[in-house]
Structure formats: structure tokens, C-alpha cells
Image (cartoon, grey):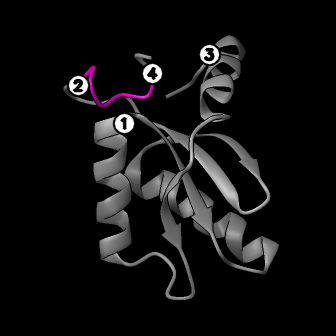
Amino acid sequence: MSLSNVQKKQYRLIGHSLKPVVMVAGNGLTENVFAEIDRALEDHELIKVRYSIVDRDTRNELINETCKVLKCDTIQTIGKVALFYRKALQPNPKLSNLSQ
């Protein structure tokens, strides 16, 4: 999935007001964490995830692994928070962060 710069800018503007819906802590990316991020992406399409990992390189590896496994795009990372986008198979306008 390749997004244009205009789309990324629009998603960053929307994502600015969002709060993280999933937190990745010391246990890293477990099956349950992947399942929760996957569910949130399917419901909301655009989500924030907080990675409470001190080491920057490890945190970046976890963000890249999340994108690879869940087939989503990283729109932006600021500090310990990453903004992810993945188009839903059946978008629900009541839940989607993109149809505000």
C-alpha cells in the first residue's frame, strides 16, 4: 500500500486528535497484542499505538514488525507513539476515524 504525501498529511491531521488505543509494553508483540491492533485497524482504519519501550532501535523494530505482520502503513511516529493506517475490508462509518 503506497499512500501519496497528500493522503499522509490528511491522516496526520486526523491522527493528531486521536488517543492511543493499544499499548505495547515489556512483553513486546504477543499474539494478543497483534489481535488487538488488527481489530482496532479493522474497526477504525487509523489508530495510534504507544510503544513503552525505552530503547529507540528496539521500538523502531517493533513498529516495523507491526507493519509487516498486519500489512498496514506507518503514517507517523513521534516519540513512543506510532500512527498506523490500513483500509478496512468492510468500513463501518460509525467506527471509522476517517469518516468524521
Q: Magenta stretch? A: 92-97
Q: Residue tagged by mark 1?
A: 44
Quadrant of residue 14 in the image?
top right
- Identify the secondary structure beneath mark 2: loop
Q: Residue tagged by mark 4?
A: 98
Q: Which residue reaches farthest top? A: 6
Indicate the amino acid at tag 3.
Gln
Of mark 4 and mark 2, the one earlier in the sequence is 2
Q: CA distance from mark 3 to mark 1?
A: 16 Å
Tally of marks: 4
Main SS of the magenta part reads loop
Residue 98 appears left or right of 77: left
Q: Residue tagged by mark 3?
A: 7
- Identify the secondary structure beneath mark 4: loop
Q: CA distance from mark 2 to mark 1?
A: 8 Å
Query: Observer-nearest residue: 45 or 64?
Result: 45
Residue 43 appears left or right of 18: left
Based on the picture, tell me whether residue 94 belongs to the magenta stretch. yes
Based on the picture, tell me whether residue 36 belongs to the magenta stretch. no
Quadrant of residue 33 in the image?
bottom left
